[in-house]
Structures are given as C-alpha cells and as structure tokens.
Image: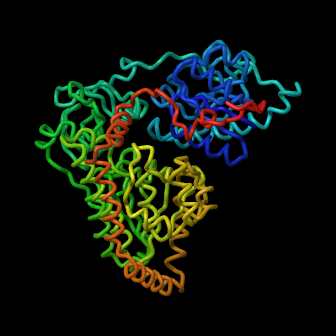
Amino acid sequence: MRILLLTHGFNSLSQRLYAELAADGHQLSVEFDIRDSVAEEAVARFAPAFILAPFLKRAIPASIWQHCPCLVVHPGVVGDRGPSALDWAIQEGEEAWGVTVLQANGEMDAGDIWASRTFPMRAATKADLYRREVTESALACVRESLSRVDEWRRGHWRPTPLSAAGGRGRQRPLMRQSDRRIDWHLDDTTTVLARLRAADGVPGVADALFGEPCHLYDAHPGPRDAGGEPGACIARRDGAILRATVDGSVWIGHVRRQGTQQMLKLPATEAFAGQAAALPERPAVLMRAADDYGELHYQESAGGRVGFLSFAFYNGAMGTDQCRRLEAAIRQVAARPTRVLVLTGGPEFWSNGIHLARIEAAESAADESWANINAMDDVCASVIGLTDRLTVAALRGNAGAGGCFLALAADLIWAHPGVVLNPHYKNMGNLYGSEYWTYLLPRRLAADAANRLVEGRLPVTAGAAAAMGLIDRCFGRAGADFEAQTRARAEQLAADPALSERLAAKLARRAADEAAKPLAHYRDEELARMHRNFYGFDPSYHVARYHFVHKTPQSWTPRHLACHREPGWRRADGAAE
C-alpha cells in the first residue's frame, strides 16, 4: 500500500513505524507538517492510499482528510482527547494506559476508531513510556488498521464512532505549568517524581534551583535519609544535584536554566556550575545496589564469570567527561577475572554518540567537538582492546550515529525487536564520523551494503539489522525479558568449553588486523575528516547542530525521506513529476 507519513518530526515512533511498515512491503514517503499547502502538495504528488499521522501538533486540514483517509495515532485510551494524554496519565498515577488509532475528521481526537491497545504503566518517564509501550502499541494498532483496509473499502467493516466506543477516556486540556507545579514543602517523593516524569523531555517542570528560575528534567529517586530541608540542594553526583523532599530526596539530572543566552538542557551541575561546586560530592562506586542512582553501574553473575557494565547517559548523549569516566570504568572492570563482559548501555538508549547540547554550550564548539570525539574514540578503543574476554553489546534501547559504531566495537551485538538503529552520521551536517567505523563496519558488511547503509540515512530495526549481519541476534521483548535472556545467553557463552579457542582466535585476528593496518591509522584518517567538519570552511555541521539542539521548526522535509519530491518521481497514475 502507498502510505504517506505526515508528521511534525521524524521522532522515535515515526522512525519505528517507517522501518517496520517498509519491511512489511508498503511504499512509504514522509512529509513534515510545515503548513497546509506543503502537505496538500505532498498528497497530490505521492497520491497515497492512506495518510498515517504518528506525531502531529495540529489538526490535519479538511482539504486533506476529506479526500484521503487519514489515520491518526493518539497516545491515549479509547475516548481520551487532548494534547497531554500521556502527561496526565503519568501525573495522575494511571495503572494502565493505551494507544488509539482513529480516522481524522473535523475535530481533534474525535474520529472513528480503527484500533486500540492498552498496556500497564511503569514508573518511568513520559519519553521512556513513549519509546517503549506507546510505540509497541501504536505499531500493533497501525498493522491491525491496515489489515482492515480491504474490508473497509468493500463496505464489510466500519470503524467504531467515538460516541459508540465507550472507554474511560475523556476530554482533557493541555497540561500547563500550573498543573505541574511542585510544592517542595508539601509534596512527597512519589508526587515529585510523578510530576517530573510526566514533563520529562518536553516541557520540563518550571521551578528554581539556588533561587534562580529553571526547568527540571531527568529525575531519579534519591536516598530516604538524605537530610536537608525540603527543596534544599544537598549533594552532587555524575552531573546531577540531590534535592531534599519531605520524605526523602530526588536526583535532578538535567535543567534548562532561564536567563542564559542559549537556554539549553544541560547537566544540572554544568548549568549551575558555581553553585554546584560548593555542594559535597557523593561519588557512586561501580559495584553498588541497583537502585542507587548513578550513570555507571557494574555487577557480576553469581559465579563471577560474566560482568555487566551499564552506562545510562541521558538521551544516550555522551559528553567528554562521561566518556572519560566510562573509559576508566572499562579499565577497572577489565581487571576483574570475568570471561564475558556485557555492555548494556542504558535502559532507554544504548548510546547516541557525542553530546551535541554540551558542545553547543561550550565556549568553542569546535574545540569541544574535538575533545568529545577523541574521548569517544578512546572508549571505542578500550572495548576493541579487550582481547582476553568476549565482549557483548546488549542494546536495551535505541542507538544512533557514534553510538551504533561503539556497539560494533564489541564481539557480539544483541538487541530486542523494539530497538531502532541509525548507523549513520550525515544527517548532522554531513559529519564524517569516527569511532573506528571505517574499521568496524567492513568487518560485518560488504562494501556495497555498508555504503547503502551510511548513505541511505534511514532507520533500521533490530530485526533488519540482524538479517543483514549488522548485529548478531534479535530476541526477546524490551525490559525484563530481554535482560533475563541476555544474562542467560551470556552465562552460556562463559560456560562454553570452546571459549578459550574462541578468545585465541579473537586475539589472533586483532593481531593480524593491527599488522595489516594499525588502529591508529584508521583513527587518524577519520579524525582528519572530522577536523575539517569542526574547523573547516564548511559550517554545515555547526548549523545542523544548532538547529538540532534548539529544536528549530522544520522548514522542509529531507529528500531521503520525501521520495515524492525526488526528480523523476512518478505518481500512482504514472504521470512523471
């Protein structure tokens, strides 16, 4: 079926739907919802059988939905209406929530219902729930809806009118900052976390730190015996600030400080560097309780044969100092007598490479870019250099750009079907990329396939990545199931009598590769191209980074997504454009 994705941006849900529906055999094109006339032109050029709207911030115009059926993905249960569906569900403590696919009409979220799904709610941020439960439910709803198209066209099936659908949803307004407000002297930790999680990603909770206005993000439970007056900032760790509540504390990982020139979302201790420096540091040891907050965490299997190193960096972005700490952690765990090391990234993201927001905020963006990419390369080199044990990259969440190639540094790569990879750099202003990708990618893909991957700039599902050989295994379901299967498989690797032979072969191959072309040469060649990206006459990288971190509204749809705008495109009627 020919399907046009009409979307505000190519977010995680849009990417997953694009990749999965393309794999299902549908012909897809994408148009960003910039204005009515642009969308109307896209519909005229592409002549879709259906329009799918996975992520919109305004209504589809009548000039489109009256002439072409439009299916809208709404992150709410049947009957729910309004732009803050997931925000309200989290903040009000809903035990279950859902996704509804409905047909656009003249009223927002009020169209006939094609499909719906419900899911149990977790104690997680809005963004995390959106990427996992909402996305999985949306994919199931969209596939169910598309399976009904033939019956619908023949008049054998009709979607359910909202008025007849029942459901417990209701019309709810846009959630405003007055609804999100935290009273630090009255609200307990559970309430504080719910409000912060409901606002994470966008828009954050308007509040103040050290008496200065800011927006708060990235909250985690702190110790119950932290001490301090409610609302007081009492310690720092891994870029976060510990803030007291009436019955405990919360870690605030990121803030957007008002009154600054750039208003970027940054680690709390960086945004308030002077004030945070006066707070006592509470460093986190690598091996500690799983619920004790910190970006890096290490544990071993009961028999001590397998180590698990997680690095839960916010949104998968890895700043220079975070890379340095991760590299140090890898050196530390390399001294442990384990046979297999599993690198698990974070629960939401494996890694997305260098930290663009911190680069944008730096005094010299070029200098910080250079420092950051070198630190990323050092992390990658430390993984490649672990020749005395088997390494596994277990992708619990999505990976993009340098994060994908960091995963390729491991001997094996595992992921679950919900993971989406973006193994390319060019969308960031034709960035060349490093992380030894020119060494690592050819070990897995032939030259033609590798070139199509990096030049195509399209999302790849874990299933497709496994089929092409980019990763080794795709199994399980997101969350506890994937983690349990990962542990079991890692234990099997460690117990395999052939592991010693496998490690010997690994060491021999690394030695042969080094003799043929030293790793340092790959790095030098990549960084020479990156140096031109950072310091050269072409400002494309700096312009693209600025628009990315400041979330500049889209002014056009990239041509690799909008195939209907390519020269020579032919409409369904065969007419050349």
Q: Horizontal placement of 139 versus 262: left or right?
A: right
The picture quadrant where one finds residue 429 is: top left
Residue 55 location (% of width, % of height): 55, 30
Residue 125 location (% of width, % of height): 44, 38
- In the image, residue 214 sits, relative to residue 427, either above or below, namely above
Q: Foreground: 490 or 376?
A: 376
Residue at 45% in and 40% down: 124
Residue 34 location (% of width, % of height): 51, 23
Residue at 33% in and 35% down: 546
Q: Horizontal placement of 198 versus 24: left or right?
A: left
Instruction: Please say whether residue 250 is visible from this viewpoint.
Output: no
Instruction: Please say whether residue 245 is visible from this viewpoint.
Output: yes
Assign the C terminus to one quadrant of the image: top right
Q: Horizontal placement of 83 versus 198: left or right?
A: right
Residue at 67% in and 36% down: 569
Residue 230 location (% of width, % of height): 23, 31
